[in-house]
């Protein structure tokens, strides 16, 4: 929808694409992503029953949004344990050390290793893990020793 030239409303700055995760419990995921990835909470809307209706987090210069599952309103679900992932969130780092350090910290916090950090044939330092809530994360940086 195009804005008219005289429309004075300003929408908050958001990236062109931001994943929206269904996570349960969302409050625990918010705390985990803060400790694991340095996520900064930008917005939070709790529901009357205590579930999280909406949360916006800034991670590594990008944005993810998340909410608890609301089966009474939406057709979303949380990832199922040991299910194949349909979406992976990619984090880009400026050094191989950041990839390794992040992988070590996050797996120590309960994330499951899928691919240990390694230098790839395509020239990056690469690792994959699954967080305790079932979401899959790729860590990428320049290849290192």
Image: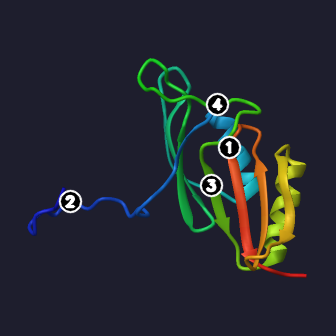
Residue 26: x and y in percent read 62, 35
Q: Are marks 2 and 3 in contact (CB under 8 Å)?
A: no
Question: Circle 2: is it few (<14), some (14-19), or many (20+) Cα within 10 Å?
Answer: few
Say whether disc 2 or disc 3 marks the residue closer to the N-terminus.
2
Say whether disc 4 or disc 2 marks the residue closer to the N-terminus.
2
CA gap between label 4 and label 2 equals: 34 Å
Question: Circle 1: is it few (<14), some (14-19), or many (20+) Cα within 10 Å?
Answer: many
* Residue 24 falls in image quadrant: top right
CA gap between label 4 and label 1 equals: 11 Å
Say whether disc 4 or disc 3 marks the residue closer to the N-terminus.
4
Residue 78: x and y in percent read 61, 31
Instruction: Answer left or right for 130 relative to 24.
Output: right
CA gap between label 4 and label 3 equals: 17 Å
**Residue at the spot x=86%, y=69% of the render?**
118
Residue 52: x and y in percent read 54, 33
**Residue at the spot x=10%, y=64% of the render?**
4
* Residue 96 falls in image quadrant: bottom right
Q: Any mark on residue 9, and which?
A: 2
* Residue 13 falls in image quadrant: bottom left
CA gap between label 2 and label 1 equals: 35 Å
Q: Which residue is mark 1?
A: 135
Q: Any mark on residue 4, and which?
A: none
Q: Which residue is mark 4?
A: 24
Say whether disc 4 or disc 1 marks the residue closer to the N-terminus.
4
Give the label, 2 or 3, closer to the camera.
Answer: 3
Tally of numbered tags: 4
Q: Quadrant of the C terminus?
A: bottom right
Q: Are marks 3 and 1 in contact (CB under 8 Å)?
A: yes
Q: Which residue is mark 3?
A: 89
């Amino acid at each position: 929808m195009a804005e008219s030239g005289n429309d004075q409303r300003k929408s908050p700055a958001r990236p062109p694409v931001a994943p929206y995760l269904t996570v349960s419990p969302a409050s625990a995921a918010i705390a985990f992503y803060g400790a694991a990835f340095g996520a900064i909470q930008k917005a939070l809307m709790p529901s009357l029953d205590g579930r999280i209706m909406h949360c916006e987090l800034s991670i590594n210069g990008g944005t993810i949004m998340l909410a608890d599952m609301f089966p009474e309103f939406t057709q979303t679900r949380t990832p199922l344990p040991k299910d194949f992932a349909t979406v992976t969130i990619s984090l880009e780092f400026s050094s191989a050390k950041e990839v390794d350090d992040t992988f070590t910290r996050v797996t120590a916090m309960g994330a499951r290793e899928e691919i240990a950090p390694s230098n790839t044939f395509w020239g990056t330092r690469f690792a994959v893990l699954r967080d305790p809530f079932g979401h899959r994360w790729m860590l990428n940086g320049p290849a290192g020793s």
